[in-house]
Image (tube, rainbow, N blue to C red):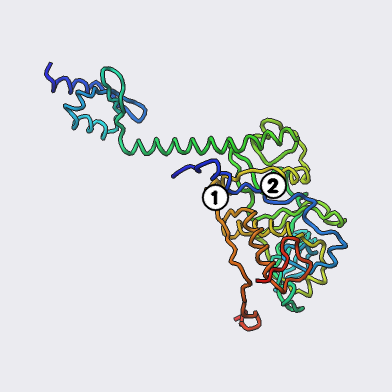
């Protein structure tokens, strides 16, 4: 076993925050109207999943919200009413104790001098400023996912559209959760930029860092 | 005293009772009775090799040497982790934000616990994650873009997914 080498080598390792600042998550209501549904968007929870599971809490209340987990292309170009979309359950932070709540917000927890990844199955979502019902912090639980029909999701309604930069953060967190690969934000961003800039069918508007490249 | 008795006496005088204990043997004795000295070491002794009453080297059993190396390595890693963590904790204390930190909780137990304050701090402070959820080492990956559009084929409708 060897310790990390030079200072430069250590600096090259991952040192990114998991998430962007709260005000960088959601596009404004005006801009939202021009955004197609995409991975990471926040929706009201449909009343039931495609398999008939009722999406309520033990108390009978509707799930707080759901976050789209299906790739964006599956909720844009290939969408039909009966298309199935994977979503993750979204839970309000207010329901958590303060300590685990803070660890979910940061995505890490310091313990015994070590900065450990915290609750890897969670994705912190900032409150939506323009939503009365979802203005406080939340998190998506990647362990609790269901498939819903596109018609039900559309009918439930989108609460907020995730900004492209914040989507990069969500993708990175999901990569860590799925495969336990801690990948630098820079790499995820570069891959997403490369993907979008080479996709002539990418539904506008493009992020500034994803202008179409003609090879 | 014969050379052999000298050696025996020197080695017998080496009180060996475990990892931390050590005894000494002169380089002359070691040269003359290498086998006995190595037997002692193999039995778990750490022997200081002296030359004119100055310690020149230590003979350590291989297992103990690798254990010591591993401990030193761990100590180095721990020092690096602490060095990475302390600025984070101190910055949070200065900012008055209750980041998820046991160290901070011990230093300043009452701080701003709002999710927004924690989120803003966490988004702006550069940190180095050192361990996974359960303290396991992290796998650090790099993703390299495969440039150009990637063609995909197939629709769910082509498949019988409910069989």
In which quadrant of the rendered image does the N terminus of chain A lie?
A: top left
Image vertical order of residue B119 relative to residue B156, above or below:
above
| Mark 2 neighbour density, 10 Å: few (under 14) some (14–19) many (20 or more) | many
Task: Give the label on residue A42, or none.
Answer: none
Residue at point 71%, 33% (across, down): B93
Asked if the residues shown at circle 1 and circle 2 are in contact, with their CB atoms under 8 angstroms apart, the answer is no
In the rendered image, is residue B133 in sight? no
Residue designated by label 2 = A106
Q: Where residue B136 appears, x then y in whole percent? A: 53, 48
Say yes or no: labels 1 and 2 on the same chain: no
Q: Where residue B83 appears, x then y in whole percent? A: 58, 35
Residue at point 16%, 26% (across, down): B32
- Identify the residue at the far front of this view: A215
Quadrant in which residue B117 is drawn: top right
In the rendered image, is residue B44 in sight? yes
Query: Position of A197 compared to A27: left or right?
Result: left
Residue designated by label 1 = B138
Query: Position of B163 compared to A70: left or right?
Result: left
Give the letter of the chain under mark 2: A
Measure the C-alpha gap from mark 1 to mark 2: 17 Å
Quadrant in which residue A8 is drawn: top right
Give the letter of the chain under mark 1: B
Image vertical order of residue B65 relative to residue A194, above or below:
above
Q: Where residue A212 appears, x then y in whole percent? A: 72, 68
Residue at point 74%, 46% (across, down): B119
Quadrant in which residue B143 is drawn: bottom right
> What secondary structure is marked by label 2?
helix
| Mark 1 neighbour density, 10 Å: few (under 14) some (14–19) many (20 or more) | some
In which quadrant of the rendered image does the C terminus of chain A lie?
A: bottom right
> What secondary structure is marked by label 1?
loop
């Amino acid at each position: 076993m060897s310790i990390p080498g030079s200072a430069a080598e250590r600096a090259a390792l991952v040192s990114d925050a998991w998430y962007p600042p709260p005000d960088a998550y959601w596009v404004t209501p005006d801009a939202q109207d021009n955004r197609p549904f995409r991975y990471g968007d926040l929706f009201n929870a449909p009343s039931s999943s495609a398999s008939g599971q009722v999406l309520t809490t033990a108390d009978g209340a509707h799930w707080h919200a759901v976050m789209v987990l299906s790739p964006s292309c599956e909720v844009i170009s290939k969408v039909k009413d009966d298309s199935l979309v994977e979503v993750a359950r979204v839970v309000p932070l207010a329901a958590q104790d303060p300590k685990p709540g803070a660890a979910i917000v940061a995505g890490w927890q310091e313990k015994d001098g070590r900065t450990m990844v915290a609750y890897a199955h969670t994705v912190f979502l900032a409150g939506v400023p323009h939503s009365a019902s979802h203005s406080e912090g939340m998190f998506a639980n990647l362990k609790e996912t269901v498939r819903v029909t596109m018609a039900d999701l559309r009918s439930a309604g989108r609460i907020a559209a995730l900004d492209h930069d914040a989507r990069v953060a969500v993708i990175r967190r999901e990569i860590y959760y799925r495969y336990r690969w801690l990948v630098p934000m820079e790499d995820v961003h570069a891959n997403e930029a490369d993907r979008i800039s080479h996709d002539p069918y990418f539904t506008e508007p493009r992020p500034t860092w994803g202008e179409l490249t003609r090879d | 005293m014969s050379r052999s008795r000298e050696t025996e006496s020197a080695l017998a005088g080496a009180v060996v009772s475990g990892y931390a204990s050590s005894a000494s043997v002169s380089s002359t004795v070691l040269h003359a009775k290498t086998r006995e000295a190595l037997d002692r070491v193999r039995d778990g002794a750490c022997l200081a090799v002296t030359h004119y009453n100055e310690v020149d080297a230590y003979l350590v059993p291989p297992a103990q040497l690798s254990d010591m190396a591993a401990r030193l390595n761990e100590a180095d890693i721990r020092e690096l982790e602490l060095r990475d963590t302390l600025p984070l904790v101190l910055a949070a204390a200065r900012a008055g934000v209750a980041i998820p930190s046991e160290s901070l909780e011990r230093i300043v137990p009452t701080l701003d616990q709002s999710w927004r304050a924690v989120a803003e701090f966490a988004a702006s402070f550069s940190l180095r994650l050192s361990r996974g959820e359960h303290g396991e080492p992290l796998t650090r990956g790099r993703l390299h873009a495969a440039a150009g559009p990637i063609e995909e084929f197939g629709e769910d409708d082509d498949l019988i997914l409910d069989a």
